[in-house]
Image (tube, rainbow, N blue to C red):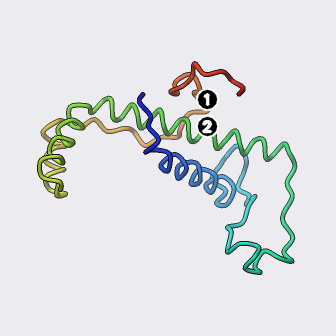
């Protein structure tokens, strides 16, 4: 795993989407079908948040929420990495083609999928475990 700072925005987006899935859209069996956070619509200096009471949830449910976000992000990372590793020849060919011609049409990409016998991942529920041991940087200390 050679993670660069160029991917930092991607990581931020993944974390933001996972938080919204759990906190705003109620997409968690563990936390439940509840809305814990409402979408932000402008900052407090725009007058929208002033005078609105913020919902206060207990630390137990917020701890569950954080664990669910971590589980969702970690398992998604592991699954995406596995898909890329299982299709490495296709990935290398696609990268080479993009360097040469900058664009690949949908038809060309579909042909590559067939040519390289792309291995797809089953659409299933992401695991219950947080899979910390399968993440990069697992050798870093737990506390900073």
Q: Quadrant of the N terminus?
A: top left
- Point 50% across, 39% down: residue: 76
* Mark 2–mark 1 distance (CA, rounded to whole Å): 7 Å
Point out residue 129 in the picture as x, y percentages from the top left corner: 61, 29
Instruction: Look at mark 2 in the image and give the residue it sits on.
Output: 71
- Point 68% across, 69% down: residue: 40
Point out residue 57 in the picture as x, y percentages from the top left corner: 85, 54
Point out residue 64 in the picture as x, y percentages from the top left corner: 75, 41
Does residue 17 lie above or below 143 as drawn? below
Residue 70 as seen in the image, left or right of residue 75: right
Which dot marks residue 44?
none
Secondary element under disc 1, as helix, strand or loop, is loop
Q: Nearer the viewer, residue 22 or 105?
A: 105
Q: Residue furthest bottom?
A: 47
Lower position in the chain sequence, tag 2 or tag 1: 2
Disc 2 + disc 1, Cβ < 8 Å: yes
Point out residue 81 in the picture as x, y percentages from the top left corner: 40, 33
Q: Quadrant of the C terminus?
A: top right
- Point 68% across, 74% down: residue: 42
Q: Nearer the viewer, residue 7 or 117?
A: 7
Instruction: Look at mark 1 in the image and give the residue it sits on.
Output: 129
């Amino acid at each position: 795993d050679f993670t660069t700072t160029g991917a930092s925005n991607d990581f931020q987006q993944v974390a933001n989407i996972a938080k919204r899935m759990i906190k705003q859209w109620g997409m968690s069996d563990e936390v439940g079908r509840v809305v814990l956070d409402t979408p932000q619509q402008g900052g407090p200096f725009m007058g929208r948040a002033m005078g609105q009471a913020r919902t206060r949830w207990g630390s137990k449910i917020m701890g569950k929420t954080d664990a669910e976000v971590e589980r969702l992000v970690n398992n998604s990372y592991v699954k995406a990495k596995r898909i890329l590793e299982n299709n490495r020849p296709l990935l290398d060919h696609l990268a080479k083609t993009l360097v040469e011609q900058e664009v690949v049409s949908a038809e060309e990409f579909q042909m590559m999928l067939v040519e390289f016998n792309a291995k797809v991942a089953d659409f299933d529920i992401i695991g219950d475990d947080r899979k910390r041991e399968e993440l990069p940087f697992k050798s870093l200390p737990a506390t900073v």
